[in-house]
Amino acid sequence: MTFTDALGREHAPAPDARIVSLVPSITELLCDLGLSQKLVGRTGFCIHPAEVVQAIPKIGGTKDVNFDKIRKLAPSHLVVNIDENEKPTVEKLAEFVPHIVVTHPVTPLDNLELARLMGGVFCAQQAAEDWCAAFAAEYAALQAAPKGPPQRVLYCIWQDPWMSVSGDTYIARMLAQIGWSIPNLGAARYPRFDWTPELLAQIDQVLLSSEPYRFTEAHADALEKQIGKPVQLVDGEMMSWYGSRALQGLRYLRGLSA
C-alpha cells in the first residue's frame, strides 16, 4: 500500500524513517502521532510540543535551512509544505534526501488527509485514525454550534507594510466555518493594503494575528482608535496551523463566533 502526497507522489510505508520536518505545525502532528523518535531534525520555529522538540536538532528556519546540518543527519524523508517552504530549497535538498513528502492543506477538512498521510507513510495509522476521529467530532460540534451574525473581517498578518490574506488561504477557509468573510484585496495570496475609506467601508472588524507579526493588545487598542472599527487580537496558531493545532483551532473558532 502507498500513500499520495500533495504533488501526487506515492510513498511506501517507512517503518525505519529518519525524518526532517520543515513545517512547524506538522512537526507537532508527528509528535502527537507518537513519531518523535523518528524526527532527526526540525526548524527553529518547530516549538510544539516544547518538552519533546527540545531534544530534536534544529536545522535552521523554514526557508533558511542549513544544508550541511541536514546532510549530516542523513534523513530518509523530508516533510515540506507548498506555502511555507521555497521550491529551490526543497529541490536542493532532494539531491541528497531520498524521499520528499509534500503537503498542502487548504481547508480545515484537509487535516484528515494530512494526518492519514503522515500516519501511513511513517507507520502510525491507528494513531492517525484516532486523531481523525477526534477532529471529526470537533468539526461536527463547530458546525452544530450556534453562531453570531456573519462578519466581514480584515485579517492582518503584518504591518510596515500592512498585509492581509486572500480568500484562497487556509486562514480564510477557517474563518468561513463561522460565517466570517474577508475582502478581496487583489490577486496576491498575501496582499498589501492601505487603510483607505473604501477599504474600511467593506469591513465590520479587524483581526490582528499574533503571528507571523507579533501583534499585541496594545496594537489592537491603538489601531481601533485610529480607524474607528472594532479590532481584536487573535491567536495566529489557532487560525493558521494545520495538524494538531487545527483540532484546538476548531474549538477556538467556536469561542470567536459565540
Image (cartoon, grey):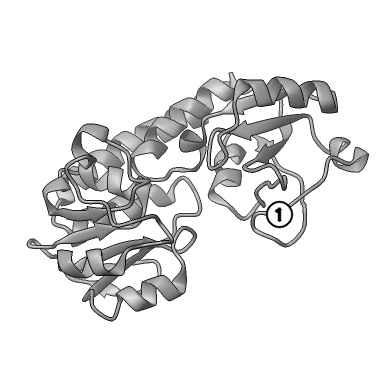
**Can see residue 149?**
yes
The quarter of the image holding the N terminus is bottom left
- Which residue appears farthest toward the bottom when viewing the image? 95
Q: Which residue is drawn at 24% across and 59% down?
A: 20
**Can see residue 2?**
no
Coordinates of residue 71 in the picture (x, y in percent)? 21, 70
Count of labels in the image: 1
Coordinates of residue 95 in the picture (x, y in percent)? 28, 81
Q: Which residue is drawn at 27% across and 35% down?
A: 49
Q: Is residue 210 left or right of residue 250?
A: right
Coordinates of residue 240 in the picture (x, y in percent)? 50, 43
Q: In this view, does 180 lie to the left or right of 225?
A: left
Q: Which residue is drawn at 30% across and 69% down?
A: 67
**Residue underneath mark 1:** 191
Corner quadrant of residue 65 = bottom left
Corner quadrant of residue 222 = top right
Task: Give the SS element for disc 1.
Answer: loop
Asked if 81 appears above or below 241 in the picture, the reply is: below
The type of residue carrying mark 1 is Pro
Asked if 169 appears above or below 66 in the picture, the reply is: above
